[in-house]
Image (cartoon, rainbow, N blue to C red):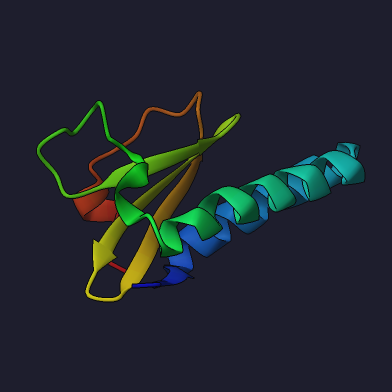
Amino acid sequence: MSRSILFTPTAREQFLAALAYIVADDPAAARRLRDRAEESLSRLADHPESGRVLPEFPDLPFREVVVSPYRFFYRVKDDVVWVVAAWHSAQIPGDPEDVGRD
């Protein structure tokens, strides 16, 4: 079963802010990150369990896909893969239960 992949408003804002920051210095690098993220996240439509369990929160129902240097946190709900956060790997993640409330 193929699922939809959607960003919460917070995750969309985080990812667009990261791309805006990168594009200011290197537009080509921003395009490469966007393309790599799209490719990696699109695999979740058919393989939603392929991301790893969050090492910081192994008991929560969230997983992540790493598109270096960014981490995309997601959760599967019904037929949708919800990307709930997009953080630079240097950031210390907060509780995804708080982030995923969008």
Q: Position of residue 97 (x, y in %)?
A: 19, 52
48 up-or-down from 28: above or below? below
Q: Residue at x 27, y 62 (%)?
A: 76
Q: Residue at x 37, y 55 (%)?
A: 47
Total residue callouts: 0
Q: Position of residue 84 (x, y in %)?
A: 38, 57
Residue sitting farthest toward the left: 59
Q: Quadrant of residue 58?
A: top left
Q: Quadrant of the C terminus?
A: bottom left
Q: Is residue 51 left or right of residue 24?
A: left
Q: Is residue 84 left or right of residue 67?
A: left
Q: Nearer the viewer, residue 24 or 79?
A: 79
93 up-or-down from 47: above or below? above
Q: Position of residue 24 (x, y in %)?
A: 87, 44
16 up-or-down from 59: above or below? below
Q: Position of residue 49 (x, y in %)?
A: 29, 49
Q: Quadrant of the N terminus?
A: bottom left
15 up-or-down from 29: above or below? below
Q: Residue at x 27, y 34 (%)?
A: 54
